[in-house]
Amino acid sequence: MNPPRQKRNRSSLTRRNALRGLGLSLSLPWLESLAPVASAAAAAAARPSRMAFIFVPNGVHLPSWTPETEGYGFELPYTLKPLQPVLDDLLVISGLTHDKGRANGDGPGDHARSASVFLTGAQPRKTSGADIRSGISVDQAAAQAAGHATRFASLELGCESGRGAGSCDSGYSCAYSNSISWSSEATPLGKEINPRSTFERLFANGQSAEMDKSQELRLKLRKSVLDFVSEDANRLQKKLGVSDRQKLDQYLTGVREIERRMESASDSSTIETDVDYPTPEGIPEDYGQHIRLMCDMLVLAFQTDSTRISTMMFANAGSNRSYKQININDGHHELSHHGGDAKKQAKIRDINRFHIQQFSYLLQKMKATPDGEGNLLDHSTICYGSGLSDGNRHNNENLPVLLAGGGNGAIDTGRHLRARSETPMCNLFMSLLDHFGTPVDYIGDSTGQLPGLSL
């Protein structure tokens, strides 16, 4: 449970002011006009850092993923080519290991372990009952230390639903396959997969009855949230400088565009799934559109400082989703067991590239979002990867890991960094928590910090 929000002094505007209307509180991006006079150094020091973790299932096709050279000036391989526009903001990391994703005497269940271990580095208890156990995940370690500073301590997003109970993988509870965020050893956090629901949650003012009334009225009249806060927006415009008026216009235009895309998606919001569950309004039929809308939600949450910590699962562990939008009708999980078949491997690398295209969309949008003297990507660290290396071998060493964003100047990007063999991935997490200002003594099976990240 998130700690209660502290009361704010409403006698004066702040940089993180909100536009208010019936059941709505539209948080604003960073606006210099609303800040008290401060030195440039003080403003830079106050700039918040953000951190997000993105999970993809079933490993990757490593020959099409791994750069041939280390250090600066490397060439992006086939799978990573869509990241060319943000190459200078990217750190490719090879060689990291999740030992606790291995069986270690527990037998089959590699997919469930791959998700459970991804951010915890802890060996999950093999059970399909209620006695699940893993470890606190890196995002929640940060949220428990710093989450009080924002409206939401953390935000858990995804693109596939799934059961939280029952057996999903060789005797492992579905909770392991469908969650990467754990607030305690026994508490996996659910994720929001509906972009409309996420949007409403971000802009609700906390009064549920009024929020429901607002949503019902807006949907009935097919109006934007901006129509409900227009009076407040017009009042605010008069208090802003020229530059901040442009920033506000850009932000509000972006919000309206996201609403338009969600409206378009809800007109044909039936999706194919292996799980029998009612599809919430607002989930697009097109999977790529679904991922991008959830990425939009993440950017909005960071831009408005609603949270500084987030996770996202592009798909659940062991997902057997097909990718008809790129002409792949086979299931992802089935293809990952390619057995050396060249045609199946080609399809796997195209699925991997499709995921990277969506990741590139997120990073480019963050880079295009102003944030103080820089942009949102400058002040964020986004970790992308899988808990398996090769989906055919189900191995957990040399994991595919990407780190994007400058981390508020803490990360030296534009490189391919190769860690020593069997370096725990949790060492990377230790470094990220330290850069984020929430250091811990250990996490999972960490043995220290990962060298070579900083400038």
Image: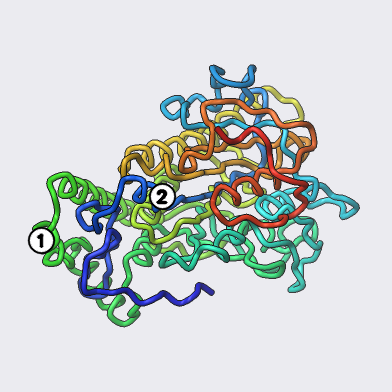
Residue at image mark 1 = 234
Residue at mark 2 to residue at mark 1: CA–CA distance:
31 Å
Name the N-terminal-most of marks 2 and 1.
Answer: 2
- Which amino acid does the dot numbered 2 rest on? Ala
Residue visible at 50% across and 75% down in the picture = 3
Residue visible at 74% across and 54% down in the picture = 444
Q: Nearer the viewer, residue 357 or 1?
A: 1
Residue at image mark 2 = 45
| 215 versus 256 height, above or below | below
Residue visible at 51% across and 34% down in the picture = 356
Figure quadrant of the C terminus: top right
Percent coordinates x, y for residue 447 in the rendering: 77, 47
Figure quadrant of the N terminus: bottom right
The 10 Å Cα crowd at callout 2, few under 14, some 14 to 19, many 20 or more, is few
State the SS at label 1: helix
Percent coordinates x, y for residue 385 in the rendering: 61, 41
Question: Does residue 147 appear to the left or right of 211 in the view shown?
Answer: right
Camera-nearest label, 2 or 1: 2
Percent coordinates x, y for residue 430 in the rendering: 66, 49
State the SS at label 2: helix
Q: Nearer the viewer, residue 286 or 237?
A: 237
Answer yes or no: is residue 334 visible.
no
Answer yes or no: is residue 223 visible.
yes
